Image (cartoon, helix red, strand yellow):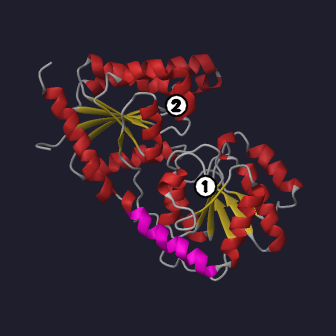
Amino acid sequence: MNSPLHIGLVGPLPPPYGGMANQTQQLAELLRSEGLTVSLVQTNAPYRPQWVAGFPVIRAIFRLIPYLFALWQLAGRCDVMHIMANSGWSWHLFAAPAVWIAKFRKVPVIVNYRGGEAETFLAKSAHAVRLTMRQTSVLIVPSGFLKAIFTGFDMPATVVPNIIDIARFSNSSPYRDNRRHLLVARNLEPIYDNETAIRAFSIVHCSYPDATLTIAGSGPLAEPLGILTKNLGLAGAVIFAGRLDRDAMAEAYRAADIAINPSLVDNMPNSVLEAMASGIPVVSTNVGGVPFIVKDEQTALLVPPKSPDAMAKALLRLMDDVALSNKLLENGLVEVQKFTWQQVWPILAEVYGNARHLSCLPA
């Protein structure tokens, strides 16, 4: 690029801490570290006044109107707009309006689509999404999995991987003879199926009564999952840590011995990559984009979704086989180097440069 760009970044920010919010915050920091100017419009800004949060329709209006105004202002001062996008109402309420405002103000726009439920969403909304995508300079996705889905709906995409901060997510002593502390870093929502992880842990706990499970996340299933834990006699062995910020999450990985990803739907889960960067062997369901980032028996153990028995068997293998655990963590540490900023930034810089170049061409 010939001169520094002013990037208009649109997306959620923590709190609450989660995959896309963390990636938005991290991307803004990294772009600024490259000398770029970054102005950010937050899609999950706090409600003002706070009392409107209790009224669904009213709160949507109170958030949407200032959001649209902020987008209009942003488009008037940035060189390229970068929109973090997801499925469902998040697309219709936040991503699509940002694309059309950028188009109206003649600013090149990049859609960074990250939703693991893209196929289901596009099956219902492909026509509307295609119409909006035609107004963009480029669609970028974090994995070959999502690229294949969008290609199937006649929308070409470029892969720009997620970024893992290996300075934060690291471990100076990853090798352990005993692996008894298990960790799930997914929110307490149906698509992440923490129930299966808890039931698998119940089986493991019968063989290793000193084993513990920490679940780092929050969500609507907190109460039923807590009841399940008590009914299984695991109340003293399962810790619900709540949703953790980036530094606390990094500490949780370092304290863990095995990471579990029990999700039913997934794209390119940061939790799996962060665990690998932290030197922890991973057991994950073989769903969505997971097999695009890890290889079974080489960088993780993959199991069918909703199968506590298969998950427990994989966990027990890692607990009983030190050589296998060490092989997975060593291979994972090598594989995760593909997702560092040093590897991803040249790809993203080219995307930005092409978007600005195309916007300068005569119509």
Q: Could you say which disc has been placed on residue 41 in the image?
A: none
Badge 1: residue crowd in 10 Å (few <14, some 14–19, many ≥20): many
In-image side of 134 versus 261 (left or right): left
Along the line of sight, which residue is nearer the eye, 42 or 92? 92
Residue 107: x and y, percent?
A: 24, 25
In this rendering, the answer to whether 130 lies above or below 20 is above
For badge 1, the amino acid type reads: Ala
Picture residue at 33% right of the left edge, 50% below the top:
29
Residue 217 in sight: yes
Residue 154: x and y, percent?
A: 41, 27
Q: Secondary structure at mark 1?
A: loop
Picture residue at 38% right of the left edge, 64% below the top:
337
Considering the whole magenta stretch, tell me its main secondary structure. Answer: helix
Q: Quadrant of residue 157?
A: top left
Q: Quadrant of residue 224?
A: top right
- On the rendered image, what quadrant is the C terminus found in? top left
In this rendering, the answer to whether 72 lies above or below 213 is above
Count of labels in the image: 2
For the view shown, which residue lies furthest in the bottom direction? 177
Picture residue at 73% right of the left edge, 49% below the top:
306
Q: Which residue in the structure is indicated by mark 2?
A: 87
Along the line of sight, which residue is nearer the eye, 48 or 87? 87
Of callouts 1 and 2, the N-terminal one: 2
Residue 354: x and y, percent?
A: 20, 37
In this rendering, the answer to whether 31 lies above or below 99 is below
In-image side of 315 versus 348 (left or right): right
Give the number of the mark in front: 1 or 2.
2
Residue 180 in sight: no
Q: Which residues are magenta?
A: 322-337
Q: Could you say which disc has been placed on residue 185 in the image?
A: 1
Picture residue at 55% right of the left edge, 43% below the top:
16
For badge 2, the amino acid type reads: Ser
